[in-house]
Amino acid sequence: MAPEHRRAPVALPLVGDGPAALRADCANCFGLCCVALTFARSTDFAVDKAAGRPCTNLREDYRCGIHGDLRNKGFQGCTVYDCFGAGQHVSQHTFDGRSWREDKDAARQMFEVFPVMRQLHELLWYLTDALSRPKTAPITAELKQALAETERLAAGTPQAVADVDVAAHRQDVNVLLLRTSELVRKGNTGKKKQRRGADLVGARLRSADLKGADLRGAYLIGADLRDADLREADLIGADFRDTDLRGADLTDALFLTRSQVNAARGDARTKLPKTLDRPSHWTQA
């Protein structure tokens, strides 16, 4: 008989599966983000938690006991976190359905592997986005090669994944992501659109024309981007905490993630890429 906490394995995300394959599947994960990661008491987390120690809200079935009320309970950080599907990959593929509760010897290694896998899956998300863009045709072969290599690294044994030099691999992939950005944003010029790493905290950018803008790593915390045009803007690493995106158009925004969207404020008029769901905390009007 299978162990109590063992579940059917899930498949490794493949390029043909599209972005949906990189969506967190908590039902097939052993609550790794609630155990492996460190929490620091702040506006995002109500308590301190050391890496490797289960959150007090984690139940025996690996579900969160306050999932429906995380924001009100002081765990806003949990609502914006996204593993890009790394959790179920580590749980069901890398460790073949063995949980950290079942296998105490493997637990420490599982907690070491998870953060590495999360970074690899984030790169898979970006590469999949890049490959979906018709404008990246000149570098399609290189993008496919990078995606295949990232999948190969993610498919390794626990020790092989733990030993991956993620920083070096990310640097190699970033060369292609930068090229992707250039190809997608080509034709969008102007000083106001070159805002890479800019400090735009609390900036008043309502109705701004930021189509094709370079906002990589920009600090947009609390910025007013209501009704702004962010189509084809490069948003990789942009900080959207409490950013007002009501009515904004992010239809084809480049490298936008669920974490960024969940950290922001929006409404029914906000336009998102088809790969992203509208956050439940956004207003309906």
Image: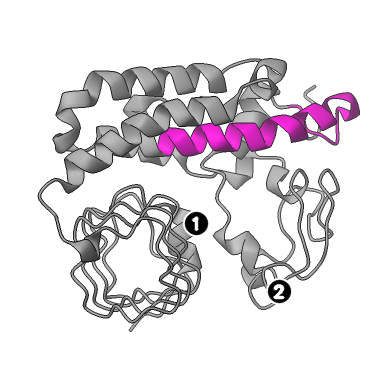
The disc placed on residue 259 is 1
**Quadrant for the C terminus in the image:** bottom left
Residue 49 found in image quarter: bottom right
Among all residues in the image, which is located at the extreme right?
Answer: 104
> Bounds of the magenta span?
98-125
Q: Please tell me the numbered disc located at residue 66.
A: none
- Above or below, 24 against 161 in this view is below
Task: Let me know if residue 7 appears in the view.
Answer: no
Q: Earlier in the sequence, mark 2 or mark 1?
A: 2
Amino acid type of the residue tagged 1 in the rendering: Ser
From the image, give the main secondary structure of the stretch colored magenta: helix
Question: Which residue type does callout 2 highlight?
Answer: Gly
Find disc 2 in the rendering and name its residue: 74
Q: Secondary structure at mark 2?
A: loop
Q: Is residue 282 above or below residue 142?
A: below
Which residue occupies the foreground of this view, 61 or 82? 82
